[in-house]
Amino acid sequence: MEKTKDFHKLSGAGLLISLGVIFGDIGTSPLYVFKAIIGDNIITTDLIYGGLSCIFWTLTLQTTVKYVLITLKADNKGEGGILSLFSLVKRRAKWLIFPAMIGAAALLADGMITPPITVSSAIEGLKIYNKDLPTVPIVIGIISLLFIIQRFGTSVVGRVFGPLMFIWFTMMGVFGFNYLVELPEIVKAINPYYAIQILINYPNAWFILGAVFLCTTGAEALYSDLGHCGRSNVRISWIYVKICLLLNYFGQGVWLFQHQGAYLNDQNPFYLLMPEWFLTTGITIATIAAIIASQAMISGSFTLISEGVRLNIWPKVKINYPSNQKGQLYVPSINLLLWIGCMIVILIFQESRNMEAAYGLAINTTFLATTILIIAYLYKIHTPKYLIIIFAIVYLVIEFAFLVGNVAKIAHGGWLTLLLASFIFAVMLCWWWARKIKNNFVRYVDIEGYYPVLSELSEDESVPRFASQLVYLTSANFRSEIESKIVYSILQKKPKRADVYWLVHVDVTDEPYTNEYKVDHLIDGKLIRIDFRLGFRVEQRISLLFRKVVEELVKNNEVEITSRYKTLQKYNMVGDFRFVVLEKVVSRSNNLKFFERMVMDVYNMLHRLSLSEERGFGLDSSFVTIERVPLVVSGTKEIEIKRVYWKK
C-alpha cells in the first residue's frame, strides 16, 4: 500500500505505471481512427487535412483541456471516475444521480466494446499475409482467455504493462515520425480551418465526426484510473503519449497523402507505416497493447460496479479480492456479463470496421454525463460563473455535435450500444428507485421510549435467552430512532431476550477510503449502538469490523461479553453472538402506481439474483437469523363487512 501511495507523487515509476494503466484505451486508437475516417471514401487532400485537424483539436480540447487540465482537479481524496465525481456533488441536487447512472451505464457498455474492437484491429493486421484469414476465432480465444485470468488477479501482469506500453507508444511515434519527415508541411493541418471546412462542406461530415471521436474514447480512463497513479504522473506522461499519438496520426496522414485518389480497400494505414520486415513484431506489440487496453477497461468496470453497490445503484454482488494490492478486485458476475457482451459484439460485427459505429456512442454519452457533473463541481468550488458558463457552452456544444455524429451511426451498429447501455441503466434505475419506494414506507420510532422494556426483558428469566449478544442492522441515521420493525422483532414477533442488544448502522461516505466508527451506550451494559462510516470503495465486512470494535470495547472495559449461563460464566467463556437481518418485503403491491409496481417486480427479480443481505454485509451465515417483515405500502382501506349468526 505504501508503494501505491508513492506512485501518486511525480516519479519515474509513477510515470511508467501511468503509461500501462491509464493510456491503454486511448493509446490503441490509432489502430482504427483513420481507417474509420476514410472508410469507403476516395482518399483526398481535404479528407486527410480535415481528418488530421479534427483529430488534433479533439485530442487538445477534449482530452488535454477538459480531462487532463480540468477534470483531474475533481479528485475525491485522490480517486477519480464518474461515481467518485458524483459523490462529490450529489448533495447539490438530487437529479444528478441520473447523469451519474447514465454515464456509468454507458461506461460499462463501452467495456463490452473496447476489447473486441482493439483486439480485432490488432489481429486483423495478419490479413496483410493472408486476406482470407479467419480472425474471429483468434479474437474470441484471446478475449476469452483474458476474462478467464481475471479471477487470479492481474497485479503481477500489471507490473510489466508500463514498459510494454512505453515500447508501444515509442514504436508508434518512431514510425509516424519516419513518414512525417517526408512531408513536414502536413503539420499545417493543425490549423482549425481544415476541420471547420470539412465539417461544413463534406457530404458525410457527421459520419466523419463520429469517426474522429474515436481518437479520444480513452479520455474517461484518464479520470477513472486517477487513483492508481496520481494527477502529476498522469499529466506529465500524457505529454509523451500525446506527442507519440500525433506523430503516428500525422505519419498515417502522409502515407494517405501519397496514395490520393485510391481506396483503402480494408487496408489499415497504421500497419502500412511499418517496414515489411517489422510487420510480425509490430502486430505482436499491437496485440499486447490491445490486451492491456482491454484489461484496463475490465478492471475499471469492476471498480465501477463495486462503487455502484456501495452507492445503492447496483444489486449486491460477490466481490473478490485476488491480492492485497490497492484497486485489485474481481466481480464474477460482471466478468461473465462483460464476456457475454464481448461475444455478442464479436459475433454480430465480425470485423473491427463494423464495430466502429457501435463504439463511439457509449463513451460519448459518458462524456456528456461527466460534463454535467463537472459543471456542478465547478459551482461547488465557487468557480467564477462566467468561466462555468464558458466551459458549459464549449463542451456541451462540442459533445452534442459528436453525439449527432455518433447517432447518425445508430443504424450501422450504434443500436447495439444503445441496447447494452439501456439494459444496464434500467438495472441501475430499478434498483435505486425500488430502494426509494421501500424507504418511503419504513417507519421509525423514538427508541428512548423502549429503554425500560428492553432493560427489563434482558433480565426476565421467564423468557428463554435468544442469544447472549443480539445484533441488529439498522438503517436509522439518528441514535434517537429505530425502525418499528426491529422493536416488533424483539418484543412481539417472538420476544428475544439477550444480555446485550446491539444496533449496527453503516453510513457510506462521499470519500473513498473512510474507515471510522462511533459508539453510543444507549442503555449502560444493555443497549449499544455502533455507527460505521465507510468510504464508497471500502469493502463492507461488517462481521469482521464489528468483532474488531467489540474487542476494543472489551479491552477498554466498556462492555462485558462473558456468557451469563452459570456453567460458562464459571469458566469465563464468551457468550454467543447472533445477528438478526430483517428482510423488508413490500406487501399489498397492488396499491402501488403502475410504474412503481413494474419497478418493484424488476427489483424482486434482481433481488433473487443478487447476494443476500447477510452475504452482502460480510456476515457469517451460521450466526445470522433472517426475518422477513412486511412493509405496508398504503393505509388500510375501509372494508365493510357484515356479521351474521348461524342458526342452530
Image (tube, rainbow, N blue to C red):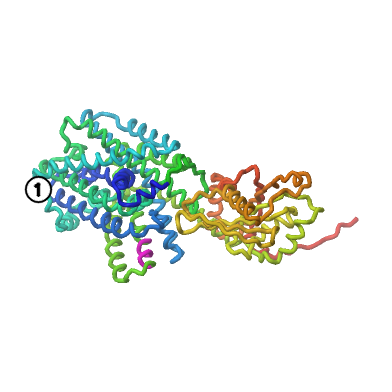
Q: Please name whichever residue, 85 or 554, is drawn nearer the observer in this view of the structure.
A: 554
Please check the rendered image and state whether residue 17 is part of the magenta-colored stretch, yes or no.
no
Give coordinates of residue 513: x percent, y percent.
46, 54
Name the dominant secondary structure of the magenta segment.
helix
Q: Please name whichever residue, 136 or 8, is drawn nearer the observer in this view of the structure.
A: 8
Most distant residue in the front direction: 556
In this picture, is 545 found above or below 634? above
The amino acid on which the numbered mark 1 sits, given as a three-letter code, is: Pro
* Residue at 38% from the left image edge and 54% from the top image edge: 80
- Please indicate whether residue 387 sits to the left or right of residue 38 in the image: right
Displayed quadrant of residue 167:
top left
Displayed quadrant of residue 377:
bottom left
Q: What secondary structure is marked by label 1?
A: helix
Residue under label 1: 184
Evaluate whether residue 585 shows in this view.
no
Q: Give the range drawn in magenta.
A: 373-379
- Please indicate whether residue 322 sits to the left or right of residue 195 in the image: right
Q: Where's the C terminus, which quadrant?
A: bottom right
Q: Please name whichever residue, 64 or 122, is drawn nearer the observer in this view of the structure.
A: 64
Give coordinates of residue 374: x percent, y percent.
35, 61
Evaluate whether residue 75 shows in this view.
yes
